[in-house]
Image (cartoon, rainbow, N blue to C red):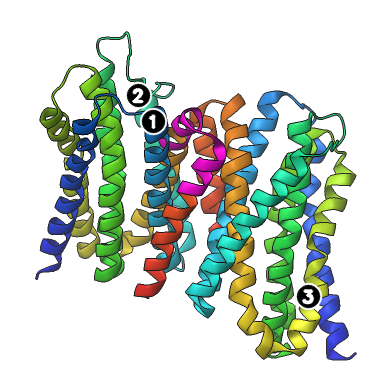
Amino acid sequence: MHPTLTVLLYSSVAALSGGLGAAPMLLRARPPMVWLGWSNALAAGLMLGAAYLLLASGGDLAPFAIAAGAALGIGFGYFTHVASGTEDLELNALQHPSPDYAAKVLLVHTLHAAPEGVTIGVAMMLSAPLGILTALAIAAHNIPEGTILSAILTSGGASVPRAAGLTVTTRVGQVLFAVFAYAVLAAAQATLPWALGFAVAALIYLVMAELLPECYHQTGPTSVAVVTILAMGLVVLLGAWLA
Amino acid sequence: MNAELGVFGYALATALATGLGALPFAFVRGVSRRAVAIANAIAAGLMLGASFGLVTEGTRYGSGPTLIGAAAGVVFILVTERWLSGRAVTVGAGDARGARQAVLIVIVMTVHSFAEGVAVGVAFGGGMTLAVAITLAIAVHNIPEGLAISAVLRPRGASVWRCAAWSVVSSLPQPIMAVPAYLLVEAFRVALPYGVGFAAGAMVFMVLVELLPGALDAARRPAVALLVSATMVAMVLFQRHL
């Protein structure tokens, strides 16, 4: 298969798997708070694992270019939050008085998908197996994130299929940015350390700004830490097994 | 000079460099809740970055042993935390939670130095020709680790000298472990991934269970996210390229 098609295929799998996150809503209209906490922690661990994979296999690239890319990645996280007025938004409220709350959360999820797409593109550029593993880690992390988003949307009155559809829609950016990043990287190899720094820093930023702050409120720090580190360890183990 | 003494001397020099990490805190006075949170975020990023480096190193010798070591590191922190919360510890003028974190970080970083000492000894086992280069590299690499310790101790009321002293103490296992590791390279090469994994697991768990909740309690999310991601990437690049 042509490598660009591999990127397209696996990033599409990642985006679509977000829809699976809506499944638990069929069982219970309102999931218990600890589910949301563990979902956040699981997603956070998988994202930290993806960041580790990129750094472990591409960290020897030009350090100043990686640092500059990282500054851009942090800037992306910071300015998209500030510009959209969501930097202090509570992201997991199941009952929110503001009528545009769901729209804001959908916006946050859409922005969040962009650096994840870049992550898939960068990993594919480093090696095809690494790219597939990274895409699958992103796919797995889309499921608990989809559960949280679906819980918010269904508690706002949306049906479960509609919540699943909206979750997948917010992840379209993963496909677009994966293919776009891969195309640019294939055309200009020199951009690889920049893109790698961007992806790693943006992933860590989003974990710290969006996922972990929520789950410490939803469940205790010990269970957050255990779930996060298990998810991260699994990705690290699979990455080592590949290498 | 005989080789064992040389290894000890070089490793001791790297331990002393850790004390330099306290230096920036000579200029910091405020001990507000926000300052503690900011310092927590910095320490979290540095420790996360250091553990990424350790895992990369460990998986080179064996990924299974590294992961087993990491699991043991997590359990170690869980048990130590329980044990500490059962007794009254005080550090400076801080509260009980702050004191527990201060004791915990010194323990975690000291334990991690055992693993690093083994890594130093095994590295010297490859021959003493690169001794000065390795020593310089590890000395420089230790400074931000001293920074991580001082970032936790200083806002909880420890003086700059105390921060420097505890930073050096946390690194003393390096020269102590470096010599046997140098003499018994083959045996220690087998143990290395377990030790390195243990240190990484303990550090990541400490970050997730103590430092980040503490940081997010009193500082805004964008500030924590910015500091953690920036210091984490900086630490990985610094330790890998210097």
Q: Chain of mark 1?
A: A
State left or right for residue B89 relative to residue A34: right
State left or right for residue B224 relative to residue A18: right
Q: Which residues are magenta?
A: A211-227
Q: Rounded to the nearest whole Å, what is the CA distance between mark 3 and mark 1? A: 46 Å
Q: What residue is shown at x 17% (from left), y 29% (from top)?
A: A163
Q: What residue is shown at x 38% (from left), y 74% (from top)?
A: A241
Q: Are marks 2 and 3 in contact (CB under 8 Å)?
A: no
- State the predominant SS element of the stretch in magenta: helix
Query: Where in the figure is residue A32, as x and y percent of width and height?
Result: 37, 28
Query: Where in the figure is residue B102, as x and y percent of width and height?
Result: 77, 42
Q: Quadrant of residue B218?
A: top right
Q: What residue is shown at x 58% (from left), y 50% (from top)?
A: B205
State left or right for residue A166 relative to residue B186: left
Q: What residue is shown at x 36% (from left), y 25% (from top)?
A: A92
Badge 3 marks a residue whose secondary structure is: helix
Q: Which mark is residue B177?
A: 3
Q: Is residue A56 magenta?
A: no
Q: Quadrant of residue A183?
A: bottom left
Q: Is residue B9 visible?
A: yes
Q: Chain of mark 3?
A: B
Q: Is residue B241 visible?
A: no
